[in-house]
Amino acid sequence: GQNIDQPTEMTATEGAIVQINCTYQTSGFNGLFWYQQHAGEAPTFLSYNVLDGLEEKGRFSSFLSRSKGYSYLLLKELQMKDSASYLCAVRPPNDYKLSFGAGTTVTVRA
Amino acid sequence: DAGVIQSPRHEVTEMGQEVTLRCKPISGHDYLFWYRQTMMRGLELLIYFNNNVPIDDSGMPEDRFSAKMPNASFSTLKIQPSEPRDSAVYFCASSRSLSRNQPQHFGDGTRLSIL
């Protein structure tokens, strides 16, 4: 099975940087996804990591360490529209389904 | 391109009634997933299909829940009889199988309230 942990809430100021951590304990691993979900809306795909290291996409970056069972999502130059829940999801080997963490609610203050 | 389309967007019904949720995946996507999201349990996978065939239904709560995919462009999730604890947002998602980094694309969800 999959055990995925994320902080419940984080608050940051507009223009700042926030790092959302995700740790996982799984019976196998074949990739980690980050999704963004605004209140009342559907989750939308942000990033994918399967190899160790940092993947950068504009203001968002995602990091993975497979040996530590650890990932983070880094949000830079925060904007008010970044206020949302951020979901970490792990894919097991030989499977296409995802197990999602409970999500981290990020609130950006002016 | 049209995304994943779900209907209805909202459903309010009394307990004991049958509820049918519908989903049209993105054209060309051969995987379809049904999820349920609640505050208490987060986003849970109920069942998923590959090429219209159910692959894993281990997340389906009980026999009151059933899902079908009669063709590549349509799937239903049915609850009969419905209970208040079934109240949740139900999402349908689809993805392609070209490689394992293909993300799942979610529909806007059906917000279900059982009174």
Image (spheres, coloured by chain):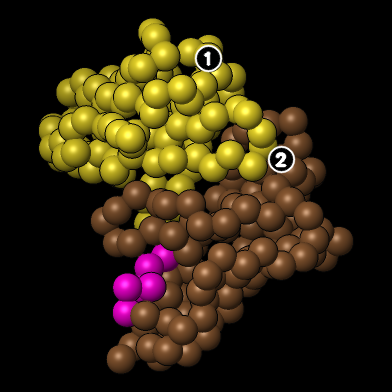
The residue at 19%/38% (across/down) is B9
Out of B58 and B32, give the one closest to the viewer: B32
The residue at 33%/62% (across/down) is A38
Residue B51 is marked as 1
Amino acid type of the residue that numbered disc 2 sits on in the rendered structure: Pro
Residue A13, x across and y down, in percent: 40, 91
The residue at 59%/45% (across/down) is A99
Residue B111 is marked as none
Residue under numbered circle 2: A92
The C terminus of chain A, quarter of image: bottom left
Confirm or deny contact between disc 1 and disc 2 (CB under 8 A): no
Which of the chains is yellow? Answer: B
Q: CA distance from mark 1 to mark 2?
A: 20 Å
Residue B65, x across and y down, in percent: 38, 23
**Magenta residue check for A83:** yes
- Give the residues drawn in magenta, as a range: A80-85
The N terminus of chain A, quarter of image: top right
Q: Are marks 1 and 2 on the same chain?
A: no
> Color used for chain A?
brown
Out of B27 and B85, give the one closest to the viewer: B27
Q: In the rendered structure, the residue with mark 2 lies on which chain? A: A
Left or right of residue B20, residue B53 in this image = right
In the rendered view, tell whether residue B23 sits above or below residue A8.
above
Q: Is residue A108 visible?
A: yes
In the rendered view, tell whether residue A4 sits above or below residue A56.
above
Amino acid type of the residue that numbered disc 1 sits on in the rendered structure: Asn
Q: In the rendered structure, the residue with mark 1 lies on which chain? A: B
